[in-house]
Amino acid sequence: MPLTVLLADDHAMLRSGMRAIFDTQPDLQCVAEVADGRAAVTEVARLRPDVAVLDIRMPKLDGLGATEMILSDPANRTKVLLLTTYDSDEYVYRALKAGASGFLLKSLPPEELISAVRVAARGDALIDPSVTQRLIARFAVSLAPPPTPPGLELLTAREREVLLLIAAAYSNAEIAARLHVGDETVKTHVSRVLSKLGLRDRVHAVAYAHINGLVRARPH
Amino acid sequence: MPLTVLLADDHAMLRSGMRAIFDTQPDLQCVAEVADGRAAVTEVARLRPDVAVLDIRMPKLDGLGATEMILSDPANRTKVLLLTTYDSDEYVYRALKAGASGFLLKSLPPEELISAVRVAARGDALIDPSVTQRLIARFAVSLAPPPTPPGLELLTAREREVLLLIAAAYSNAEIAARLHVGDETVKTHVSRVLSKLGLRDRVHAVAYAHINGLVRARPH
DNA sequence: TCGGACGTCCCCCGTGCGGGGGACTCGGTT
DNA sequence: AACCGAGTCCCCCGCACGGGGGACGTCCGA
């Protein structure tokens, strides 16, 4: 059975152009054309096409908002491809966050649009190369380890160990038990950590450790 | 002038296959074939091709390591496309982090490999659709706001305000000055925050706030 | 061989902190 | 009217904490 497609764009000319492209493919069937985002949402809910191709700029509800509404429905099985004339980073992030299966520029060659629909239908995703480039850069920094915080290199191994335990909100006595040393020893380490890092008290130490990424916040 | 390409793969058969593909394109010139990662790095440094196509599994130095060495050189202008038989998330992350311009599966149709080289050469990037899908999912969660931490809804507006100041490592006296209230008042708020959240002391409160994303760590 | 860094343990002392009370004002609900 | 939650201020008490000292052993490099 053919893949069903919904087209959403406020320019009738562009819609008929895309429909013509799909009509060249026997296994692709364009089951609806709409001119705004709200209509796209309702028609997707009614017809449940395999793929919805949405322009970002549309009246009443833009393509991003429509995408969010469509994909936030847990019963939905329609994949969403977003089309845009100009790419903006904000658009991309919002689109990907909403779970779009594609983010493409309208300059895309017709045959690639067809292949994009097939890619989306089988559950994969596709991003325009010019956007991918910037996405990688952004993704890389989000993976990059935080730069070594200032002053950390002054600490000995033991002191860093103690700092991590402070950051985990352990008391001196708890740290002592955990390291199997006396609590007076821990006090010494703590004092050295504070003075070496220029911190007033252990509360500042906890903040320092977390802000500088010494403690991994809820693992993603 | 033609685009120059370097091929790196430990299978001679695959190299000659790819070379044959490139030879069908007048504007693509395969300037070198190497069989391991170390050779790839030195040849890229010597020949400075426009694009290097690297297999991930290679002797001596794998494609990821080679990518990192190539792209860590600030004088480098060669773009890197990575090829792999099986995709693993870890591979992808490392590749993107290193700054690769592409991450493709060997199942890729030949004509798409050609187009990928052109995409990379012009500075854009390209990721295999099956990988993109998972990348989006991962990217989305990295953008997702942290879920509302447990217990936070028990706090009044004022108490939340105080909690944020505690998280910023302010002392009771400093919080009092900042809020223009007496320090006895602050003590009351702090006590309520601690008991409502089940925290032992302000140190735990600082850790709680940071772990639950109430305080934005170094903005990316 | 002598230092110096590191890790360990000890004492004193002042104070910020947190728990336990209580009390007052406001605003909104019943 | 009575009530209650939120915000404000006050007192007392115990204690963990942090700064100031000093001391001792080990290991390593000068």
Image (cartoon, coloured by chain):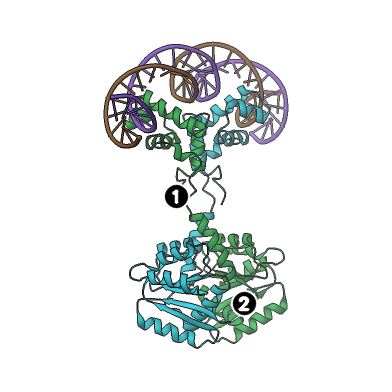
Chain colours: A cyan, B green, C brown, D purple
* Horizontal relation, residue B68 to residue A13: left or right: right
- N-terminal label among 1 and 2: 2
Identify which residue, B25 or A85, lies in the foreground. Answer: A85
Provide the residue designation for mark 2.
B108
For the residue marked with disc 2, what is the amino acid? Leu
Q: Would you say residue B48 is visible in this rendering?
A: yes
Provide the residue designation for mark 1.
B219
| Residue drawn at point x = 67 percent, y = 64 percent | B62
* Horizontal relation, residue B45 to residue A130: left or right: right
D6 versus A82 height, above or below: above
Identify which residue, D2 or B38, lies in the foreground. Answer: D2
Q: Position of residue C5 (x, y in %)?
A: 61, 31
Give the CA separation, mark 1 to mark 2: 37 Å
Q: Position of residue A201 (x, y in %)?
A: 48, 29
Q: Position of residue B18 (x, y in %)?
A: 64, 80
- In the image, are marks 1 and 2 on the same chain? yes
Q: How many marks?
A: 2
Q: Residues within 10 Å of mark 2 (few under 14, many from 20)?
A: few
| Residue drawn at point x = 53 percent, y = 53 percent | A144
Chain identifier of the residue bearing label 1 in the image: B
Q: Would you say residue A197 is visible in this rendering?
A: no
Q: Position of residue A204 (x, y in %)?
A: 47, 33
**Does dot 1 land on a helix, a strand or a loop?**
loop
For the residue marked with disc 1, what is the amino acid? Pro
